[in-house]
């Protein structure tokens, strides 16, 4: 009976946060009816995947696609610098909903909503509370970064989904391992390690990480961090279960097989995402090996060597890009959302109750969440060092994996909206901090009245900030002066 109530509460929680997320992501998704920011690359690239089977070159003109004129698409392969999983998903949205602004954005809205649901369920399991699961889901549902990227045909929301899913699957693998260890206690010095059986959840996580890498290469940072963390989890759990040889068992039964599986599954999934590149002749660099026989490697198939050379060109582009952009942002400022990216801004002719009306979309996170995330990250470090509480560390790994690897690339134009990939882990960290505040460990799970009051007021502030900034996250026409009062920092303008 208790388990049934627990599940019904979880289902209700998922339905509520999922509905909030879906409404904020799908409402008026067709607006604005123009290509927003880098949709000029990804929406058009996705359309060419439908039309040609590969990404064709669109030339210099960028203004006719949204008007339904696709005549600029040529059969010459286009030089693109990101893998294609995200673009394939955008193309799927177009296939289902049509080549319209709604069509090229709906896949992002679907995956953005699913990310909220995965985060809610993951937080519920990690914090052992449906309440805190709903808290985490609500935070992500009303975060500005998550909303903007879920309403725009860019790649980062898909990356965020796959890495979050990968972590959730690794957590399910941990829960299964704990149950197996509890059912087979260590009974002696010579006792064998318990049979765990196939690690299907871990295999599924590797597939998710392969799809993440197939969306953006930065998915590999998350994969490495989470897989190492899963090994650490296993060592801790085997030791807690009383296994005398817990370190050896972890190394031989988890670390080594996991490393081998990762080295096979992730590249295999990544390679599979390039299937249409292999199956078409017009793709960029597709025939490179055939046209450069002097550089042929005898043992490598021509198509594979061409793909390797293409990846060398992509890597060279990313490592040598030095052009300036007015909205580039140093990673040091991402957590405080110091320099958000303006995706769209134009004067519009409409009745907004003012002389000048504008439509603006700014990829600015809900600062009540992100600024609290900075405080929670500091608190997690403090609790680890002083209180030996590792839970905050586990919650912080996703934030650090998505943030720190970008610091060495600060010399090239990178943008604050990349942080949407680790926004799910920011809200997990804030949810952990709120749970610790409202239910201090010393109270044995009971609520602290002052802590509950503080968290309650915090939720109110988060929702007020979300309501205030929502027009700037959705492009709703507003008076210019209303837009101006949202520019709290000079760097936001």
Image (cartoon, grey):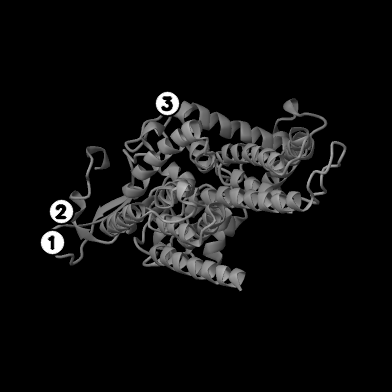
Residue plotted at (70% across, 48% down) = 202
Asked whether disc 1 touches disc 2, contact meaning CB atoms under 8 Å apart, the reply is yes
Residue under label 3, please give it: 411
Spatial CA distance of label 3 from label 2 is 35 Å
Q: Quadrant of residue 336?
A: top left
Placement of 438 over or under 21, stated as above or below: above
Measured Cα–Cα span from mark 1 to mark 2: 9 Å
Q: Earlier in the sequence, mark 3 or mark 2?
A: 3
In terms of secondary structure, where does tag 2 sit? helix
- Circle 1 Cα neighbour tier, 10 Å, few/some/many (<14 / 14–19 / ≥20): few
Question: Quick check: can you spot residue 129?
Answer: yes
SS class, disc 3:
loop
Give residue 354's mark. Answer: 1
Q: Position of residue 116 (x, y in %)?
A: 48, 58
Percent x, y of residue 237:
68, 43
Q: Earlier in the sequence, mark 1 or mark 2?
A: 1
Is 138 situated above or below 251? below
Left or right position of 299 against 392: right
**440 and 420: which is toward the camera:** 440
Residue 9 in the image: x percent, y percent? 52, 69
User: Which residue does the numbered mark 2 point to in the structure image?
Assistant: 481
């Amino acid at each position: 009976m208790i388990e049934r109530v627990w599940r019904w509460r979880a289902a209700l929680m998922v339905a509520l946060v999922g509905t909030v997320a879906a409404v904020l992501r799908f409402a008026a998704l067709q607006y604005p009816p123009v290509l927003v920011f880098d949709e000029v690359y990804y929406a058009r690239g996705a359309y060419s995947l439908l039309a040609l089977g590969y990404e064709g070159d669109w030339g210099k003109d960028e203004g006719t696609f949204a008007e339904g004129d696709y005549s600029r698409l040529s059969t010459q392969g286009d030089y693109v610098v990101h893998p294609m999983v995200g673009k394939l998903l955008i193309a799927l949205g177009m296939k289902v909903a049509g080549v319209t602004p709604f069509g090229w954005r709906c896949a992002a809205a679907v995956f953005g909503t699913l990310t909220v649901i995965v985060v809610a369920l993951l937080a519920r399991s990690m914090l052992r509370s449906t309440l805190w699961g709903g808290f985490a889901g609500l935070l992500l549902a009303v975060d500005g970064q998550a909303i903007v990227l879920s309403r725009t045909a860019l790649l980062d929301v898909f990356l965020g989904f796959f890495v979050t899913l990968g972590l959730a699957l690794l957590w399910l693998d941990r829960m299964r391992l704990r149950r197996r260890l509890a059912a087979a206690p260590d009974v002696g010095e010579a006792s064998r390690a318990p049979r765990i059986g196939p690690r299907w959840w871990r295999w599924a996580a590797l597939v998710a990480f392969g799809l993440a890498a197939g969306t953006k290469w930065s998915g590999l940072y998350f994969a490495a961090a989470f897989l190492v963390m899963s090994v650490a989890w296993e060592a801790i759990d085997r030791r807690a279960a009383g296994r005398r040889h817990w370190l050896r068992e972890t190394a031989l039964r988890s670390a080594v097989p996991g490393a081998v599986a990762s080295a096979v599954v992730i590249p295999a999934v990544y390679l599979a995402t390039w299937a249409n590149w292999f199956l078409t002749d017009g793709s960029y660099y597709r025939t490179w090996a055939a046209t450069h026989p002097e550089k042929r490697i005898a043992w490598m198939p021509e198509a594979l060597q061409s793909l390797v050379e293409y990846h060398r060109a992509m890597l060279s582009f990313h490592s040598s890009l030095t052009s300036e952009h007015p909205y580039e942002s140093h990673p040091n400022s991402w957590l405080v959302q110091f320099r958000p990216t303006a995706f769209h801004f134009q004067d519009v002719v409409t009745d907004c109750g003012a002389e000048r009306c504008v439509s603006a979309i700014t990829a600015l996170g809900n600062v009540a969440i992100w600024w609290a995330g900075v405080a929670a990250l500091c608190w997690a470090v403090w609790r680890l060092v002083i209180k030996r509480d590792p839970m905050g560390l586990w919650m912080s790994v996703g934030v650090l994996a998505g943030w720190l690897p970008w610091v060495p690339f600060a010399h090239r134009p990178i943008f604050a909206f990349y942080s949407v990939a680790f926004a799910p882990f920011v809200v997990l960290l804030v949810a952990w901090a709120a749970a610790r505040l409202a239910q201090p460990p010393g109270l044995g799970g009971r609520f602290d009245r002052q802590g509950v009051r503080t968290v309650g007021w915090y939720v109110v502030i988060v929702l007020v900030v979300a309501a205030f900034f929502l027009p700037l996250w959705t492009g709703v026409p507003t008076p210019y002066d209303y837009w101006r009062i949202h520019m709290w920092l000079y760097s936001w303008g």
